Amino acid sequence: MGSLLLLWIAPIVWMVTTAVKPTPEIFARPPRWFPRTPTVHHAVVVVTSWPFLRWLLNSAIVAGATTCLSTLVSIPAAFGFARLRWRGRDALFLLFLSSMLIPLEVNVVPLYFLMNRLHLLNTYPAVFLPMVGMPIGIFLLRQFFLNIPGELDDAARVDGCGNVRILWHVILPLSRPALAALGIYMFTFAWNEFFWSMIALQSPRMFTLPIGLRALQGAYDIDYGILMAGSALASLPALVVFILLQRSIIRGIAMTAHR
Amino acid sequence: MRRPFALQRVAELAAFILPFAAFWVLFRLGPVLYGVFISLYRWDPLGEARFAGFGNYLRLVHDPRFWNALVNTLKFAALAIPLIVGLGLLLGLFIFGGRGSRAAKMMEAGFFLPYLLTVSIVGLVWRWIFDPDFGVVLLVLRQAGLHPPTFLNEPRWAIPVIALATAWWLAGYRMVLFRAALEDIPEELYEAARLDGAGGVRIFFAVTLPLLKPAILFALVLTTISGFIVFGQVLMMTAGGPGRASEVLALYLYRYGFEYLEMGQAAAVGVILFLIILGLTLLSFRWLGFEAQL
């Protein structure tokens, strides 16, 4: 199993070592596992000839906005589904939930028409707005809210709290793990979104990282030193965050499937 | 007398639900219906639209390239879905077996890692590994005295290699799901089975597997969707080639919509993709006998 893990990680290691090899070493035969004369040349090309840092910023803005907005609208909705009693509640919830079967990808043409009409093409909102209403948010939070004992609400109600204050002062403080899980899920989802972003974003300065890497490939074809340097740089933020927050990320991801 | 009170309740409920519902209607449900509408028209790039009924669908039916893309998508799905779910399940069982140990935690983190990479990185890295001229896999196999195919340059091998890359990318997430689901199975059930004299294999099939059903269903639905909308890996690794040997439905949709500007036809492909996903999900619900627990 240990050797399977090594094999599993090998592509990532290969990406990094290729990125720091001078070009002749990249194409050496037999392949050279580690560089003899490491270089940052490729990384410098990526950062200086391309708006790479701007792409990083774009990605952060899109993923940040998606995460904030979707959490913001999912919290009250999940509360409405978990705690309030009203006719048609479960049917509506099921309807929302079933839209998990509508991936962004099948909607790119109508979304293109829609964003064109709203004059939003080539802007951040064009990319993040379609990701806000993802049902995973209400699904995950509702599940978590349901597991919080109702007696806590009752006690607060006796003290004269309304629903808004119950949500704010009772439910939310207890829901940090679920909020963290949702945040992690939404952020990675938006950070990695590819198909729709590629259609919605047209000018290179608006590209997110995944689309920027596609542009690099278009420009350098098989100049793998530069392509791997771009890939390594683009994966750096995710890798650093993962190393720092490993356990909570994995715990959060595990929660996204819990019923 | 009760009226203001009821009204207030309704207003409050609306304030809770509507923000989410608005986004959902505008950007999720709305586009599906809008997509059906678009697919019934022929769109001139200059903005003129002409009602075409099922014309776009008929054009798809008569387009061998569409059938090729459909077959390629099915091939990819048939390879990738079992590979991803199966690998995820095996890894999940393995990590669960070593639960509590440092090694298991480290391994879980390692196997999960690729999931955090964006699809273009996955595509670039695997394209490099399997490069027909300098790919390390080819060089190593040749060093070992074998005569490997040039993989991404061969129609027969392009889709399997992309499926392999996809499994590497996505299996880690399924592993975490399965590991978490395994932890939810009460220890007493295993003990009871053991007291009844059941061996490891029997316990697996009589206790573990049935209780994993909901997790398997979830992973299957999730992976089916990823399998049918596959796009980024293909674009980056082969761009649909060699020839059109790996052109999948999403790539076909992209090219017809945004390169040939046949928006109606592209929208029709989107509708068909949605129907395929819907049908397969209903099928797997049925197959695994899932009782929708809310």
Image (spheres, rainbow, N blue to C red):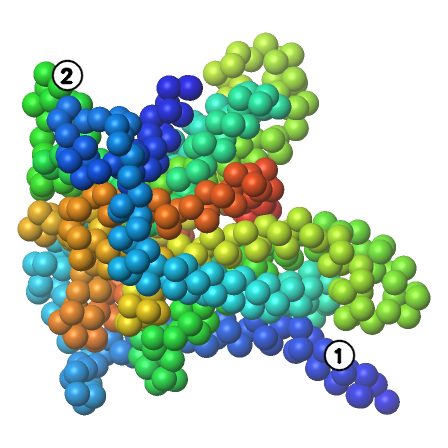
On the rendered structure, is A91 left or right of A24? right
SS for tag 2? loop
Percent position of residue A34, x then y: 28, 27
Q: Closer to the camera, A13 or B100?
A: A13
Q: Which residue is mark 1?
A: B9
Eyeballing the image, is B41 above or below A218? below
Question: Which chain is mark 1 on?
Answer: B
In the image, farthest residue toward the right: A159
Label 2: how many Cα within 10 Å (few below 14, some 14–19, many 20+): few
Splitting the image into 4 quarters, where does residue B99 fall? top right
The residue under the point 10% across, 16% down is B145
Percent position of residue B49, x then y: 20, 87
For marks 1 and 2 on the same chain, the one whose residue lies earlier in the sequence = 1
Visible residue check, residue B122: no
Q: Which residue is mark 2?
A: B144
Q: Closer to the camera, B209 or A78?
A: A78
On the rendered structure, is B207 left or right of A126? right
Eyeballing the image, is A228 above or below A138? above
